[in-house]
Structure formats: structure tokens, C-alpha cells
Amino acid sequence: MRSAQPDPTPEESPLTQPDRKPKPRSVLVGLQLPGVSDEDHQASLAELSRLVHTLGFTVTATVTQKRTGPVTATVIGAGKLKELARLTGGSGIVASQVPESRRKREAREDLEAETPPDPYEAELEPIAEALQATIVIFDSELTPNQLRNLESATGAEVLDRTGVIVEIFHRHAKTREARLQVEIAKLKYLAPRLRQARGGADRQAGGIGAKGAGESAHELDRRRIRDRIAELTRELDSIQVGQEERRGRRAEQARVALVGYTNAGKSSLMRALTGSEVLVQDKLFATLDTTIRAMHPPSQPRILISDTVGFIKKLPHDLVASFRSTLDEAAEASLLLFVVDASDKTFRSQLQVTREVLGEIGVDTAASKLILNKIDRLAEAELAALRLEFPDAIQLSAQRPADVAALREQIIRFFEADMSEDELHVPYSRSEVLGEIRRHLRVLQESYDETGTVMRVRGHRGTIDRLVKLLQSTQ
Ligand SMILES: Nc1nc2c(ncn2[C@@H]2O[C@H](COP(=O)(O)OP(=O)(O)OP(=O)(O)O)[C@@H](O)[C@H]2O)c(=O)[nH]1
Ligand SMILES: [Mg+2]
């Protein structure tokens, strides 16, 4: 029986809601530039909304504007800024000197006529304080100057998409390596903004600027931040040396990396293929650490699967750079499985982003397979259309054991194709090598003669050659 006491744990993850304070209220702002379709613009805002929910904020409104380019000082035009400020209880006016000529020119770039009628326009009364948002989140990267101007006009804390992503990474990173990488990225992100924030209005409590690494960063001057970054980088380097060694030892094994957009289902597939308990969550950036497990039930020779950090559009460059080493795992895999959520209408552009980021990191995508995941959510007609569009892709649901078993067979077949067979003679004096052979090669036949064991084996050419050499070395 459940106790009559109220449940002490809030519904949300304790990660996002450490206490039961009301969730911070936020407004999203998106600028739609020429060349960006309505669909892409909406998808980007929907994704930002998911990111913001992951941080534990509610979204009270979304403000969008079509323009030929961002306004230098405030991104959105003066009228839109007023509309935004109503939602946050701000003045809507930037306390700064923008030359009149620039203001006029930028006003002409407004494409307001194309935007749908604004539901707030008619109602000019300021909204009740209890309904006002305390955080404004822009779907693009803001310069430190824009950030300060927008904070002054809205009276709210202002964040950009990068700031949101950096904060999610900061909260979700678990291993020492991931924490170091994120800490470095966060300090690099905060450093230039810090200088500006000091001269500006007081930052509101409850948001990002008042918590975690941001708090300590506030107290550090830029030189100390630089020193701290250098120190963290040294620590990271020392961890990564150990990883290089481990990676070297795994180099000759068959390796598969699961790569793809955040929330595509990589960790779900990892669980299904390896029987491991990696974290699966309907949250963006649930996984920030690379996990490597052998396929289970085991294959002979064994095949290692690695789960990797997900990608997202407009991924900040510093974050890409900081995850480079994590993704080295993917770089060294002989088979990349590109996992996409086929039930997401925007999966094509998500796949494109994944390919681009991997290209940037220099991961060779030569041997790869496309996995259209979550097909349990699609109708037969949609699946047929996808089969025509992606004839070589594997359609599956990570939640259906039969589909996962079929994928497992395909993976085994892939590695089987470049295996060869050979005969090894293991003298009785070298029987310690038998264990090594059994671990890395499939033994097809085994017999004994007066000098030792004769084994017919199948495996990777490189592994066979290495073991042959090992057997010859001290004979
Ligand atoms: N319906 C359905 N849901 C799925 C399937 N595969 C994964 N999911 C769900 O999709 C969500 C994300 O799954 P994860 O496996 O955590 O995704 P991920 O790619 O590892 O995400 P990140 O770690 O954030 O990059 C979870 O809620 C899963 O339960 C599937 O085949 N069908
Ligand atoms: Mg994951």
C-alpha cells in the first residue's frame, strides 16, 4: 500500500528540480532569417523548448520575428522587443546609445508584414507579475553585448541556445572526463560574457547565472579563468593518455559505434544489443559519456559496441571540440551505425547534422549503416515510403527483440566478410597462448599431435597475424 503521505520526490528528475520551488518561467525568442523555411523555424523552436524543459523551466510564450538580419544591438526589432518586455515586466528600452541612422536602417529590415497577427498586440496592459517570465531564451547565439542589452530591456535573465546546451551538458556529465570537458566548455562560454555581465544590471536569482560553475566563475577574473582552463586541460590530458593505451589494446577487436542525433535511441539500442544497463531517457543529452560493452549474447570473436554523445543543431564549437576525444571511439570503429528517430519529421536534417559534425571531427564514415529506429510509431505506408527513399537502411524498433536480433545478425555478417581462416600450431610449451587465441578468434577445429595443439581458426587477418608472430617469437 502506498502511504497517505505526499510523495517526497517531485515528479521531475531531481537533476532538474533539486528542491520543490516553482519552475522558473521562460519565454523563447526565435528570429527567422531569409532562407529558413517555416517548418525548420518551428522545428528549431520546438527543439529549444525541449532543451529548456530538460533544464526544468516552463515555457510561457514564444516570440518570433522574420527579418532579413539580426538587429546589431538587440537581435529583434524595437517593436518586438517591447512585446517581449511585456511578457517579462521590463521596460522594452535598452539603456544604450544606438545611432539613429543604424536604428532606421535596421527598422527597414523588419519583415513584420509576413508574420501572423500578434495575439498580444491588442492587449496593451502589462501582464500580471505572477505570469511574467524571469528568463528569456534566444534560439541563436548572442554576443555578450546583445546579451547585456536584452537583459536591460527585459529585466529578465537572458540566455542563448548555447548557454542552455552548455548547462544541460554540465548537469548531465558523469564521468571525470566528461565533467572536465564540460567544465572547460562552460568556462570558455562564460569568460567573455562575465566581463559584460559585471557592468550590467544585477542578474536574477534562480537562473543559470546564479548557480553551479557560473557562481564560481563570477568570482574569477579572466586571467584566473584562463589558468583554470589550462589546469583542467592538463588533467584531461592525463586521463586521456590512459585511454589511448586502453584504446590501443582494443584496436584489433571488431568495433561498432552508435552515433546520431540526441534522443534517436542510441542508448536503447546499446542496451538491447549488449544487455547493459546504460541510461535511457526521454531527455535531450541523456548520454554524455562513451560506454563500451561487448555484444551479448557473445559473438565469437567478440564485437564491441560503443554508445556516444548525441548531436544537435547549432552545437557550439567548443562543445564539439571538447567531445572530440569521446568521439575518437567512433573514429576507431570499423562500423558506424547512424541511428535516427524515423518517427521524427525532421530526421533528415538531424542525420545531416550528425554527418557534418562527424566530418568536422574527422571521423571517417566509410563503413556505415543507417538505422531507422522507432518504426513502431509509423504506419505501414510510411515504412514503405521510407524503404523506397532509403533502400539500404535497416528499419527497426529498439524495443522489439526480434528486430534487435536481426540487427545483431547483420553486424556479425559485416565483420564476417573480412575475416579469414588459418591453421595455428601451438606447441605444448606455449599453451599460455591458447587462452589468447580463444578470446580473439573463433576456433573451428582443434586436434592434437605429439608436439602441440593444431587449431583451425577464423578471425581478423590482423589478429591472426599477431598471434602467429607471438607463437613464432620465442620458439
Ligand atoms: N517508441 C519507441 N521509443 C524508443 C525507441 N527507441 C528509443 N525510444 C525512446 O526514445 C527516448 C530516447 O532514447 P535513448 O536511447 O535515451 O536515446 P539516445 O539516442 O541515447 O539519446 P541521448 O543520449 O540523449 O543522445 C527514450 O524515451 C526511449 O525509450 C523505439 O524503437 N521506439
Ligand atoms: Mg543516450
Image: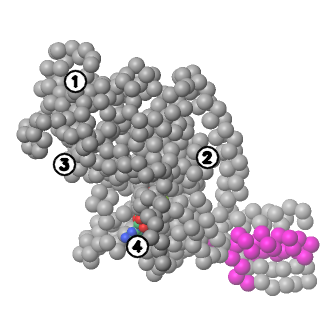
Which circle's residue, 2 or 4, is located before the other in the chain?
A: 2
Query: Does the magenta-highlighted stretch encompass residue 433?
Result: yes
Q: Which residue is mark 1?
A: 93
- Quick check: 48 left or right of 357? left
Q: Is residue 447 above or below residue 18?
A: below
Q: Is residue 152 above or below residue 240?
A: above
**Image spot of residue 113 (x, y percent):** 8, 37
Label 2: how many Cα within 10 Å (few below 14, some 14–19, many 20+): many
Instruction: Give SS at disc 2.
Output: helix
| Magenta-colored span | 419-445
Q: What's under tag 2, amino acid-wise?
A: Glu
Q: What's the residue type where badge 3 is placed?
A: Asp
Residues at marks 3 and 2, CA–CA distance in whole angstroms: 39 Å
Tell me, yes or no, if residue 110 can be seen here: yes
CA–CA distance between discs 4 and 1? 52 Å
Sooner in the amino-acid sequence: mark 3 or mark 2: 3
Q: Residues within 10 Å of mark 3 (few under 14, many from 20)?
A: few
